[in-house]
């Protein structure tokens, strides 16, 4: 996506495992967001002191608090090091708030690289997204970029790209890749293979629930909906009733042409 994020954290939870290292940026460019962690400052009267940003907001997740400025470019997480859930949640609020201002969405999907273009399999957990990605890997040698969470970014020219992320769910698939989007596919388990393009309300019903659309500042959800609308106008969306074998690959392959 071309964006750099700097997270300053005095301890590690999962940011430094082998998957996260693939996304580590060591350049000197100015980051688009700075996020740091400091211990809670509570006096003997149990009054908590928090950093203040003019026009900014504060969010509480578990026992931790995120204080962030108006445009989500700088923030501090105030929490104790044992509140992993709270610190992680605060970091996600800061990240999503920044991304959505940069024409970027987070989609629950599996992503494959097919001849330099991204195919996204999206839908609820258990529907077979990763299974379909693995079928393409097995039968067409497609590369699986991510098995769970993908960033969708619109560049300055208006073209949409799918980008791998460090979050990969229970799967092992996690690559730092950026590819133009060829198609979005919503798989449905079936005994037979049928595929059709969807549009209108059915398209929205199948894709909308799988996109993270927070409402954390004025106009936040509207920004996200605008980006999603552009995505759905630029990339075809297919409903794929499918089996767990090569027939599913062949059906989609034929439709893609």
Image: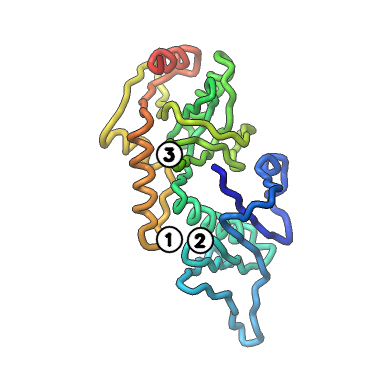
Q: CB under 8 Å between callouts 2 and 1?
A: no
Q: Residue at x 47, y 40 (%)?
A: 152
Residue 171 quadrant: top right
Classify residue 27 as left or right of residue 199: right
* Numbered badge on residue 72: 2
Given residues 113 and 146, the one toward you in this image is: 113
Q: Using a 10 Å C-alpha cutoff, classify the residue at mark 3 as few (fewer than 14 neighbours), some (14 to 19) or many (20 or more).
A: few
Name the residue furthest left. Answer: 200
Tell me what residue is drawn at x 48 percent, y 44 percent. Answer: 106
The disc, 3 or 1, on the residue closer to the chain's N-terminal end is 3
Q: CA distance from mark 3 to mark 1?
A: 27 Å
Q: Quadrant of residue 217?
A: bottom left
N-terminal-most mark, 2 or 3? 2
Residue at point 62% right, 55% down?
30
**Viewer can see residue 240:** yes
Looking at the figure, which quarter contains the N terminus? Answer: top right
Q: Which residue is mark 1?
A: 216
For the residue labelled by badge 3, is the local secondary structure a helix, a strand or a loop? Answer: loop
> How far apart, in angstroms, are the residues tagged by discs 2 and 1?
10 Å
Taking depth in this image into account, of 148 and 98 the one nearest to the observer is 98
Q: Is residue 200 above or below residue 90?
A: above
Question: From where the camera sits, is residue 169 visible?
Answer: no
**Total marks in image:** 3
Residue 185 location in percent, x, y? Answer: 41, 27
Q: CA distance from mark 2 to mark 3?
A: 24 Å
Quadrant of the frame with the C terminus: top left
The residue indicated by pointer 3 is 157
Mark 1 falls on what kind of element?
Answer: loop
């Amino acid at each position: 996506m071309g964006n750099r994020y700097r997270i300053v954290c005095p301890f590690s939870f999962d940011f430094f495992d082998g998957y996260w290292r693939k996304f580590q940026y060591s350049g000197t460019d100015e980051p688009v967001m700075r996020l740091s962690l400091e211990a809670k400052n509570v006096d003997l009267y149990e009054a908590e002191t928090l950093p203040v940003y003019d026009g900014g907001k504060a969010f509480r997740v578990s026992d931790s608090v995120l204080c962030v400025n108006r445009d989500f470019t700088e923030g501090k997480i105030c929490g104790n090091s044992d509140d992993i859930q709270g610190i992680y949640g605060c970091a996600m609020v800061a990240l999503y708030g920044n991304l959505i201002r940069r024409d970027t969405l987070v989609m629950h999907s599996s992503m494959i690289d097919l001849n330099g273009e991204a195919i996204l399999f999206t839908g609820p957990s258990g529907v077979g997204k990763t299974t379909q990605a693995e079928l393409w890997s097995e039968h067409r040698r497609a590369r699986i970029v991510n098995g769970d969470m993908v960033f969708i970014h619109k560049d300055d020219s208006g073209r949409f790209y799918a980008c791998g992320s460090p979050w990969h769910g229970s799967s092992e698939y996690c690559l730092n890749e950026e590819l133009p989007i060829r198609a979005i596919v919503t798989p449905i388990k079936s005994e037979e293979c049928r595929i059709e393009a969807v549009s209108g309300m059915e398209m929205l019903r199948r894709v909308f629930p799988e996109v993270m659309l927070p409402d954390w500042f004025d106009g936040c959800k509207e920004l996200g909906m605008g980006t999603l609308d552009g995505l759905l106008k630029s990339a075809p969306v297919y409903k794929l009733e499918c089996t767990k074998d090569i027939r599913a690959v062949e059906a989609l392959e034929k439709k893609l042409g």
